[in-house]
Image: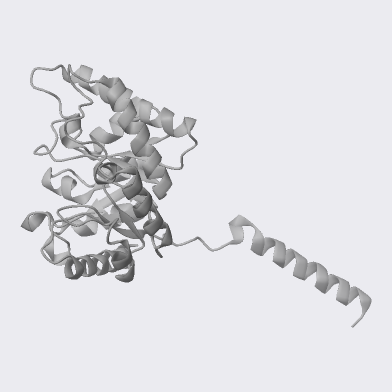
């Protein structure tokens, strides 16, 4: 080969390599949703983490409240088991016990702060990346109490949580969960959760999209498109038969819109099935296959 031809070929190959390595030249990455099993009903994901991993889930979502009931020794044992498992804790639900009020005239901020600090420390040790703030009983506004004041109290609570996460350099965010009116008399839609997050104005406070609550409240799933950048976590269950594990797209026509809108916003976080069951193994496996099938169809 002549020197010029060899040199020109080398330059051309180098240019091709550089182009291939630039972000603009790379093919767009596909969304990669992760699927988990959240605490609900009588099962305990933290205790059953090995079984849940064997069923094919990517992570578990245990309850903060259940974890807080453990003694220090019991928590250390649960932590060791979780760290030895092939899957991990990546989210946690049921943040506050119902008796620990964060709205109303009898809020004890010091008591709330002490609970939150211990709870978030345990969540961080377990590796949680999202802590769901549903806690319907704790956040519901007492009768006769001004809703505007309760709204400010929720902002104060969330800012306190966010500031503690930042000060301790924890790796999680708080995800405000919209809940049906039967469970909470405030923040009942994605739109309201999004407003609360914006009013709170803290980088560690974001929102969730829960299909069950969205369906029960008949909220337009277009809210997902508007609030997209704030959505950090999702839940799903079948609302048609009393909040059970989803199995088939035909159960609810809104499944398709839910998954389709998540795809449209580029959501690539986590989705946990959170439902009642009489046969956890059968229902969990069916629920996981449902989520994977829907994701593949609508991605």
Q: Residue 273 location, x and y as percent?
A: 24, 57
**Measured along the vertical axis of the image, is residue 147 above or below residue 9?**
above
Question: Which residue does the image show at 42% across and 43% down from the upper left?
Answer: 124
From the viewer's perspective, tell me whether residue 87 is left or right of residue 281: right
Question: Horizontal and vertical percent for residue 117?
Answer: 37, 32
Total numbered circles: 0
Nearer the observer, 194 or 157: 157
Q: State the quadrant of the N terminus.
A: bottom right
Q: Residue furthest bottom?
A: 1
67 or 267, nearer to the observer? 67
Residue 85, by quadrant, is bottom left
Q: Is residue 3 left or right of residue 158?
A: right
Q: Residue at coordinates 46% horizontally, 42% vertically from top-left?
A: 171
| Residue 110 in view (yes/no) | yes
* Residue in the picture at 23% in, 26% down: 102
Residue furthest right in the image: 3
Image quadrant in which you'd find residue 36: bottom left
| Quadrant in which residue 183 is drawn | top left
> Residue 191 at what x, y percent from top left?
25, 36
Q: Would you say residue 229 is visible in this rendering? A: no
Q: Is residue 50 above or below residue 266?
A: below
Q: What coloring was used for the rendering?
A: one colour
| Image coordinates for residue 24, horizontal then vertical, percent | 59, 56
Quadrant in which the C terminus appears? bottom left
Name the side, left or right, on which 139 lies relative to 61.
left
Q: Along the line of sight, which residue is nearer the eye, 83 or 198?
A: 83
């Amino acid at each position: 080969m002549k020197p010029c031809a060899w040199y020109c070929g080398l330059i051309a190959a180098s240019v091709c390599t550089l182009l291939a390595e630039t972000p603009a030249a790379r093919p767009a990455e596909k969304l990669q949703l992760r699927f988990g099993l959240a605490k609900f009903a009588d099962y305990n994901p933290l205790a059953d983490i090995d079984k849940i991993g064997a069923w094919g889930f990517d992570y578990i979502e245990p309850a903060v409240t259940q974890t807080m009931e453990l003694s220090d020794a019991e928590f250390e044992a649960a932590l060791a088991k979780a760290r030895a498992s092939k899957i991990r804790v990546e989210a946690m639900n049921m943040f506050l016990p119902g008796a620990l009020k964060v709205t109303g005239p009898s809020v004890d901020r010091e008591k709330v702060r002490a609970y939150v600090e211990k709870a978030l420390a345990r969540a961080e040790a377990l590796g949680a990346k999202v802590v769901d703030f549903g806690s319907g009983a704790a956040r519901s506004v007492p009768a006769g109490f001004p809703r505007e004041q309760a709204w400010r109290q929720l902002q104060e609570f969330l800012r306190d949580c966010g500031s503690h996460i930042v000060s301790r350099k924890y790796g999680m965010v708080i995800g405000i969960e919209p809940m049906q009116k039967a469970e909470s008399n405030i923040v009942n839609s994605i739109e309201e959760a999004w407003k609360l997050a914006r009013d709170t104005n803290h980088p560690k406070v974001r929102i969730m999209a829960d299909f069950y609550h969205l369906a029960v409240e008949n909220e337009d799933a277009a809210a997902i498109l508007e609030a997209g950048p704030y959505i950090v976590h999702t839940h799903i269950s079948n609302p048609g038969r009393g909040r059970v594990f989803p199995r088939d797209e035909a159960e609810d026509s809104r499944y398709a819109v839910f998954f389709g809108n998540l795809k449209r916003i580029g959501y690539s976080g986590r989705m946990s099935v959170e439902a009642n069951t009489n046969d956890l193994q059968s229902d969990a496996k069916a629920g996981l296959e449902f989520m994977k099938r829907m994701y593949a169809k609508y991605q």
